[in-house]
Amino acid sequence: MKSLKSMRLHIGIFGKMNAGKSSFLNRITNQEVSIVSNIAGTTTDVVEKSMELLPAGPVTFLDTAGIDDSTELGTERIKKTMSILNRTDIAVLICDYNGIDTFEENLIEKFKELNIPYCIIINKTDIKPVSGEMLEKIKKFTDNILVASILKDENFVFNFKKTLVKLLPEDFINSPEIITDLVPQKSTVILVIPIDKEAPKGRIILPQVRTLRELLDNNCICIAVKESELKQALENLKTAPSLVITDSQAFKQVSQIVPQEIPLTSFSILFARLKGDLKVFLNGVKTIDNLKDGDKVLILESCTHHPIEDDIGRVKIPNLIKQKTGKNILFDNISGHDFPDISNYKLIIHCGACMTNRKEVLSRILIANNMNIPITNYGLVISYCLGILPRATEILTK
């Protein structure tokens, strides 16, 4: 099964112009992925390359523009480069034999601020060796240092892989589970999958696919139904299912059909735990009652799509919150990897994040927490506004 891009290890490549970032990517992938040139500023936007990199497994490299580009366009390139930090699981900082200065030191501070493990590669040492004084300076920042000529050292790829293994995040080595720790093997689980305007034609959405696959891997008996057939499915079973999982949009109808003694949750809530921090999200959702007239709420969607008439992020959730609070709340919607200035918002609501990696969600949580702005998730907001949050999260919090 091809690894999903959102679940790959994201490795960001950073450094000044002409430090050797693109050469590094080409050498590691053994392909001409990025253009290599002596002309400064050749890389103008982020270049992404996904591959299998043993022993780490599936990874996505993010080759960024030089951090010292002082041109007018360069300012935008640097802004884009810095935004990549929020998606970076491991950072590779590349410099040449001159070592590091303020540019690299500022990046290292960002790595530390966002809890990004990193290594430093001192490149082009075939032209001139790095001084002992500079090497000692770099060692004060990290022990994960490679002194090499990226293009010429025969053992460079092997040595980089050894360094990479030391930097692998714990949650990548021991990947978190979606569902299998919540239900016993060979148990019966019902998945309620509405086929509505938001369901892609001819297929089901990613959280449903991934949850189904994990249940099958756990030898569970999976029953997939639309909400209109749920009652009949329950009546057809000789024994009650261990769990019912629903699309959040059908929460109200499903909660009325499923008996109270049967655990119930949603795909979005499962992904709140998988991709984010469930405890933080739970604390965030409870602040909805504190919203006042004129307060601004930011709704974040991982993927970009054409809004439909009854869009969950642009229509359904805003309406639910307005009905719950009785307040005139203002809503902004942002799609993709952009993360704006959040200082004017009273609450941030994140989608299930099926199309982005966990690091990006955790980075957003970290920024929000540092600014004391509550953050939560689609499924939690919907269940809270419908008055079924305790039931919807009981199986994950007991």
Image (tube, rainbow, N blue to C red):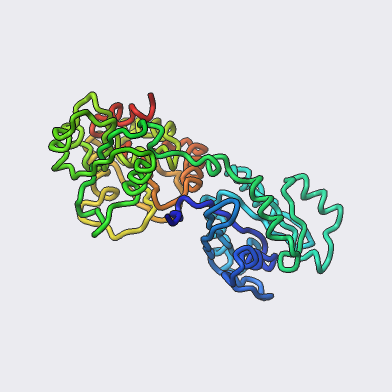
Q: Is residue 390 left or right of residue 144?
A: left
Q: Picture quarter containing residue 263?
A: top left
Q: Is residue 177 left or right of residue 222?
A: right
Q: Position of residue 335 (x, y in %)?
A: 38, 55
Q: Nearer the viewer, residue 197 or 55?
A: 55
Is residue 102 visible from the viewing direction of this image? yes
The mark tally for this picture is: 0
Q: Nearer the viewer, residue 219 or 198?
A: 219
Q: Is residue 5 left or right of residue 244?
A: right
Q: Is residue 127 above or below residue 369?
A: below
Q: Nearer the viewer, residue 96 or 33?
A: 33
**Residue at position x 28%, y 34% from top?**
188
Q: Picture quarter containing residue 20?
A: bottom right
Q: Is residue 295 left or right of residue 109?
A: left
Q: Picture quarter containing residue 282?
A: top left
Quarter occupied by the N terminus: bottom left
Quarter occupied by the C terminus: top left
**Residue at position x 37%, y 30% from top?**
396
**Residue at position x 78%, y 47% from top?**
139
Q: Position of residue 380 (x, y in %)?
A: 32, 36
Which residue is farthest right?
132
Q: Position of residue 205 (x, y in %)?
A: 30, 52
